[in-house]
Image (spheres, rainbow, N blue to C red):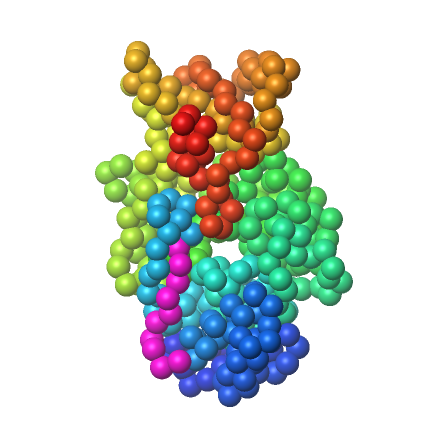
Amino acid sequence: MIQNFDQYIQGIHPSFKLNKFQADEFSLVKIAHKYQQEGEVFEQEIGDFLQEWLNQKDYVIVKTSGSTGTPKEIKVLKKHMVNSALATGRFFKLPEETTALLCLPVSYIAGKMMLVRAMVLGWHIDCVQPKSNPLDLLYKRYDFCAMTPFQLDNSLGRLHLIKKLIVGGGAVSVYLKKLVQGINTKIYETYGMTETVTHIAARKVNGKKNKKKTFVPFKTLPDVQISVDDRNCLVINAPKVASNTITTNDVVELITYKKFILKGRFDNVINSGGIKIHPEQVERKLQTTILQRFFITALQDDSLGEKVVLFIERDFSEEALAEIKKQLKKLDSLDKYEIPKKIYFVEKFEETHTGKINRVNTLKARLA
């Protein structure tokens, strides 16, 4: 296995295969050109990235998802991408000739990194069109794959084709975690961002050890140091994948120097009558009751300052509203301050470019 960027930069791993074809640097240039000229949209994106990866620049341009702010383009150093690939290989025990499936768009970092891992670690990777059910027409078995929670939810019946699966781009709901218990595929939820070249931590979401645990901590990948600031927000020091220390807005509880529990976003905290409420924690409690997409947020309130409100993606009816209120009253895990003071039904949530719920825009559209 390649150990560092200086060794890698001499060429593509000799075991690397793309769509069953042995590929070195010279042949990849041809493949990239062919994809750009003749391929479908997702193949054109692959061709564009391969050309960018093989040029003389030491960085690539990557779009952020826009889930916590306005989408933007940033420069990511190629050496950091290589180091991230090496760390993933070690953490998940994925040696050369690992068979991998790429089913994410290469326009974002998660898709790009699947290709980089394959080139760096010598995997045999197949590429399929990114869609909600990427395993639908496949029969081949793979050692490794990366998906979004939405793709996982739509692939449950064919997960036997994947040995190890990482899930990122959004939280894995309590409901979805229940559905994957008993499945032989080893499924990991990841934590990371574009600025850290995808994941810097992961946690297993299925298996006997995790079945009854409410909060399973994330464990950091190699060469990642974590701490918290005075807000109890996670601070990431990972010099092999990020040039600077990254201070996040994610409130965490440190368990050890390598493990942490994610509580929620600092900028999402609701101050209701002096009580601080993390929407994400309330959402985890509600996931056992509400099967549609939903989220918790706050509205201004004259007496409380802010009040907790619930948005549900479904058509409104008096019967549905009454049933939700009934279920909420039965939910013993909800603290009295966490009970939504208002419930809104929205036919379709606003979304980010990557399909995540855009809470701010949904709130504005509903209340306009």
**Residue sitting nearer the eye, 252 or 67:** 67
Instruction: Report the span colored magenta.
Output: 55-64
Residue pushed farthest right? 139
Q: Is residue 60 magenta?
A: yes
Q: Is residue 306 magenta?
A: no
Task: In the rendered view, tell whether residue 24 sits above or below residue 263.
Answer: below
Q: Where residue 128 sits in the image (x, y, percent)?
A: 63, 64
Residue occupying image coordinates x 60% and y 76%? 38
**Residue sitting nearer the eye, 182 or 282:** 282
Residue occupying image coordinates x 35% and y 45%? 69
Q: Is residue 179 visible?
A: yes
Q: Where residue 219 sits in the image (x, y, percent)?
A: 45, 50
Q: Quadrant of the C terminus?
A: top left
Task: In the rendered view, tell whether residue 121 sits above or below residue 135.
Answer: below
**Residue sitting nearer the eye, 299 or 362:** 362
Task: In the rendered view, tell whether residue 335 sits above or below residue 15.
Answer: above
Residue occupying image coordinates x 50% and y 23%? 344
Residue 79: quarter of image? bottom left
Residue occupying image coordinates x 62% and y 62%? 129
Residue 229: quarter of image? top left
Q: Is residue 200 visible?
A: no
**Residue sitting nearer the eye, 121 or 314:** 314
Q: Where residue 66 sits in the image (x, y, percent)?
A: 40, 49
Residue pushed farthest bottom? 26
Residue pushed farthest front? 368
Q: Where residue 157 sits in the image (x, y, percent)?
A: 73, 48
Residue 113 shown left or right of residue 134 in the figure: left
Residue pushed farthest left? 230
